[in-house]
Every structure is written in C-alpha cells, then in structure tokens.
Image: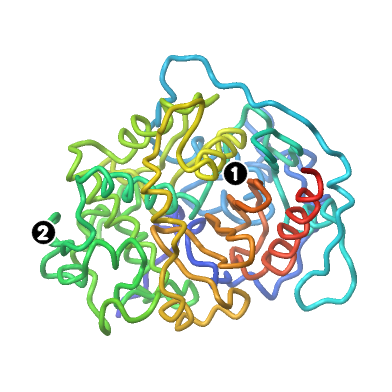
Amino acid sequence: MKKYNPSHLTLILFFILCSSMVMAQKNEKFLDAAASDPVKMGWMVGAPPAANRMLHFEDGSFFQFPGLRWSVAHMRQFMPTTNVSRGLGASTALEKNLIPAIDQVTFIPIGLNVPMTWEASLQKVYADGVIIMHHGKIVYEKYFGALTEDGQHAAMSVTKSLTGTLGIILATEGLIDTTKLVSEYIPELKASAFGDATVRQVMDMTTALKFSEDYADPNAEIWKFSAAGNPLPKPKDYKGPKSYYEYLPTVKKKGTHGTAFGYKTVNSDVLGWIIARVTGKTIAEVLSEKIWCKLGMEQDAYYSVDADGTPFAGGGFNMGLRDMARFGQLILNNGLVNGQQIIPAAAIDDIKKGGSKEAFAKAGYTLLKGWSYRNMWWMTNNEDGAFCARGVHGQVIYIDPKADMVIVRFASNPLASNAVNDPYSLPAYHAVAKFLLQKK
C-alpha cells in the first residue's frame, strides 16, 4: 500500500486524538516548560519573523515542539476556519474570589511517592492557562506562555464533548432518536461501518471500526482521514477522498457494534454530520445558537474546516479560557444559568449517568480503571461523580459536582497522550476538590 507523505497531509489531526496515543517523539528529551516558553523563544516575531523562528502549516513545523507551544494559541493563523458567534449582547461577568493557597495544595502523582504541589504540576504538564471555578466564582486563574486573557487556544478533543453535548441536546428536543441507525439520518453512510450502528453507539464510541489512529503506521486509516480533511490543494497524484464527508463513507466495519469502547475520532465527525443534517445548519451555527449566544461569552470561538468548509467536529474547536470555564460551569449547573435553562436538564442527566463500564474496560486504559464514556464525555465514576472533557497535549474541562468545582486547562505538552499528563493531573484535580470542600 502506498505510504502517505505527511508533508502533503493536514496536520490538523495532530491535536485531536485518543488519550492512549503517544507520538513518535516520546523517547526524545524536551526542554521544560520554562525553557520552552514560546514568548521568550520569540516565535513569529518580526515582519517577517526570522527564518529560525517562523512556523508553517504546510510543512508541519507549526506543530513541532517547541514551536507548537506558540501555535496552539494562534491556530487561526495557520488554517482556514469558521466562526462560532457569541452574538451581540454583553458578556456575563465572572465573579472572582481568588484563593492563592491553591498553589500549595499537595498530592502524590500516580506511580511516584514524592509529593508535588498544584503549582509545580502546572509546569510539569506545560500548562498554558488554568481557571478553577468554585461555587460559580473564579478562585484561581493563571496564564502562561503564548496564551493571554483575550486569546484563544486549540481545545483539541475537548471538541468532541461539545459535539456530544449538542447531540444529546437535539435528542432531548426530539430532533435525533439515539436508537435509530446512523444510515436513517445519513443514507450516504449505509454501506459503511456506520450503516448498521445506532446513533447511541456513535455517541458512546462503541462502534466497531477498522480505523487505526496509530501515527507510527504510515498506512493507518488516520492518515487517509487526515488527507481527506486537508484544506490545502491536494497533490496531483492524490486519488482519495477530498473532504470529511467523502471520507466517512469509506470506513469499514471490524467486529460487532455495542460490545466495546473504541476511541475513534471519526465517530465525532459522524455525529457532527447528523447534527448538520437534522438542523440544516453547520455544527458551528448550532453551537452558536444553542450555547455561545446564550451564555454571555466574552469571545467568538472558531472551528478549523476542510476544503469544503466543513467544521472539524472531532477536534478543530478553539476558544478563550474564560469561555471554556463558562461552558464547564453551565454543565455543572445542569444547564441552568441566570435562571435560564440553556441546556435541558434531561440532557445533562443523560451525560451524568455514564456509559458501560464493561465496554470501557475492554479498551485497556490502565490509568482510567472504573471509568466509562457517554455522549463523548469521560466519566470517572469516582466518589465525587466527577466527569471531564479531554484533549491531547493537556486540554481539559474537569467537573466535580460534590466539590461544586470546575477546572479548565489549556496546555502544550510536547507529548500528545493524556497518559503522560494523567499521573500528575488526575490526583491533582482530586486534591484541589478536597481542599475546596473544606472551604464551604
């Protein structure tokens, strides 16, 4: 089989995928967070920037560490995008009650026996920005690297949870029946792996797909999906699909739907297609109308798009940190804000009940034992009922209902896998929750 040259492919998918994926860089030694600070390194400064400080989309340099630490906060400068409007109304102010002592909260990282502070953990995971909400107020807010208060950052696979949230909203409103086959909504997918899968199986990623996201394998399906989604002109000898919608019907089935969790990005793009089909609008427009225009966001957000202008529903979303905090707080508040039920409570309840632990266990996530997955949200099933949206390189919305806490974080870890962040992040979140529970 012909190998795909990464220089000809969209590098968009480098920032989306599953928490088990570690890029080929994993054996390399990296500059630490302080030494790789993108502002200090001077990326993209000048008119034009110096050759050794200039980043490009077409050759992939924009997503090579340490340059990626600048790029994740400036994705719109590298690729075509579509806007998610916040509307014309005033933004909703977020109250602050800062608690500096959070920096000194300690925890034991998984697999280690030496305590670490919350403050130190942020450097360990290459955090670009963090907000902690408690009782609806900001108690912690810090920015690092190239991210600023008025900046936007790639959310990567946190995008999937936004897609899943829109899906369950539309299901609650009666526009989507999750028990129906995908092909009933998208006939174009009837002959594909998705043809005999239910919408629920897509939303919970229990579809059985022949789809590898192993970047080390040049023949993996992820490269073909990447090639299809490439917004740049295709090479003259390119014969494959030229958009996401052209690629998805080519996905083949492997196994039996509904038996095992399998984290595959294409599920999110199928759900995005269903959302677009039943509403007659792009997912960017639906997100704007259902949430962004109603929540008093500070900024517009945006999606990266393919050559046809289709938003990347599996990982192309970019937003401001405070707006991510507003969204997380909305989910924590069961869809209610300022007396307005923006998201039906039944939709939030459906997320919170979680998915099949048995199906999830078959995926073999050693650090996520007892977890499940539903509506494209990760359910910890811990004693606090915490659940989260997760994206590679360290993006997260972590919601702890018992502690009445939301943690949102943007990051630019040189390694893509959540597995390199989780030993420092998961116990840190739980330690902060315990600390805040004492602040009632």
Secondary structure beneath disc 1?
A: helix
Viewer-proximal residue among 203 and 307: 203
Name of the residue lying farthest toward the front: 440
Q: Is residue 357 above or below residue 128?
A: below
Q: CA distance from mark 1 to mark 2?
A: 40 Å
Q: Which mark is residue 71?
A: 1
Q: Earlier in the sequence, mark 1 or mark 2?
A: 1
Q: 353 and 372: which one is in front? A: 353
Q: Residue furthest top?
A: 89
The front one of 302 and 257 is 257
Which part of the image, by quadrant, shows the C terminus? top right
Tell whether label 2 touches label 1 (CB within 8 Å): no
Note whether residue 232 is visible: no
Residue underneath mark 2: 184
- Residue occupying the point 27% across, 82% down: 254
Residue 361, percent from left and from top: 48, 81
Identity, as a three-letter code, of the amino acid under mark 1 = Ser
Residue 24 location in percent, x, y? Answer: 59, 72
User: x%, y% of residue 341?
Assistant: 41, 33
The picture quadrant where one finds residue 356 is bottom left
Q: Is residue 340 above or below residue 348?
A: above
The residue drawn where x is 62% and y is 21% is 93
Q: Secondary structure at mark 2?
A: helix
